[in-house]
Structures are given as structure tokens and as C-alpha cells.
Amino acid sequence: MKNIAVYCASSSQVRQVYYDEAYRLGRLLAAEHIGVVYGDGGIGLMGRLASGVLDGNGKITGVIPQFMVDEGWNNTDSTRTIVVNTMHERKAKIARLSDGMVALPGGMGTFEELLECLTWKQLGLHAKPVVILNTEGYYDFLLAAIDRMVEEKFIRPVHREMYTVVRHAEDVIPALRNAKPWDKATRRDAAV
């Protein structure tokens, strides 16, 4: 794995434990010479992730739409910044540049990115590993919702195998490396 997409919050109001895990993940990825591709935010978990990568002498690529740059939301310390026109282009570019995806706790944008990369995997558009860093049980309710989707037959049980859930930053890289292979031919399983 050369580059990993990391989806996370830009909120500056979250508890310290979330900042600590984001920073730790950045340092761990840098130590393994794994580049990070993210949304180029300079505050919140995005900023702490970037600081961890850079403090570990790693490389971080930010992908950000022009309107966010105009607002001053970009991280001027990123190793490389790619400016795109739209949010859709941003997500597609991050996915293309990455060999796997990791979701840290976050808000609407993080959820949307995580669910879209899972949808793309379900449809066989990629077979990359997806890891959910469930710090403090943050994603428990989403995982319960996925279980409900299976129970109510909106998705198949095999779709639970599209991702791996871990609780600590130290478990992310092993989870990426040991992810169950996903056959793009499972597209046939997208229809229930």
C-alpha cells in the first residue's frame, strides 16, 4: 500500500481522544511510509492527522475544491495539494489516488464519504480495503444500522465483509493489510 485515503472531521469542538487517535494514526502511517490522501483540512481531526503525518516525516496529499480554498479552509502545510472544482471530483480523486480507505469519527461529510466508498465496493467499482476506526464506540450506531439492513434484507450478510472495524489507531494498518479480499464479481450480490 502506497497511499491510504483517510476520511475524518474538520470540527474543532470534539473531545481530545478523537484528536489523539487522528494524530497517532498519522504518525503510524508515516512510520510505515504510507502516504495519506485526505480532504486537505487544516483544523479538527483533519489537521491533527496531517500534523501526525508531517511530524513523522511522512507525505500527505490534500484534495480540496476551489470554493474551500477561497474560504481559507485548506491546509497550507500539506505535502501536495490538488485543487478540484467540485465535491464530487474531490471524492473521486481521493478514491483514485488511494489503495485503501480509513474512516475516523466525523460528521455528515465523513459519513457520506464512508458510505459512498462502501456503496462503490458493493457495486464492484473497487475492491480496496475499508477500515472503520471506531474510537470510543463512535460508529456503534452505524454498525447496528447495517445489521438492521441485513436483518430486514436490504443488503446481504456478505456486505458486512466489505469493511473491518477496529478501536485503536495501532490496529488500522494490520487491518488494511489483512483485509478479506473482495471480488469485484460480487456485484451480482448488490441486488438482494
Image: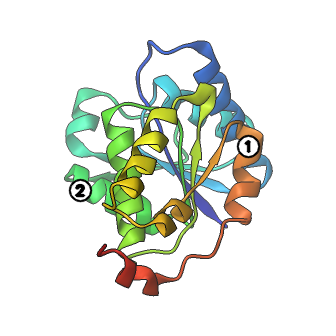
The foreground one among 88 and 131 is 131
Residue at image position (58%, 29%) is 137
The foreground one among 85 and 101 is 101
Horizontal relation, residue 140 to residue 27: left or right = left
The three-letter code of the residue at mark 1 reads Asn
Horizontal relation, residue 189 to residue 18: left or right = left
User: Quick one: label 2, few (<14), some, or many (20+) residues within 10 Å?
Assistant: few
Instruction: Name the residue that disc number 2 marks.
Output: 88
Instruction: Name the residue that disc number 1 marks.
Output: 57
Q: Are marks 1 and 2 in contact (CB under 8 Å)?
A: no
The percent coordinates of residue 89 (x first, y second) are: 26, 59
The foreground one among 20 and 48 is 20
The three-letter code of the residue at mark 2 reads His
Marks 1 and 2, the one that precedes in the sequence: 1
Residue 113 got which mark?
Answer: none
Residue 1's place in the image compared with 79, above or below, is: below
Secondary element at image label 1 = loop
Quadrant showing the N terminus:
bottom right
Secondary element at image label 2 = helix
> Which mark is in front, 1 or 2?
2
Q: Is residue 76 visible?
A: no
Distance from Cα at disc 1 to Cα at disc 2: 30 Å
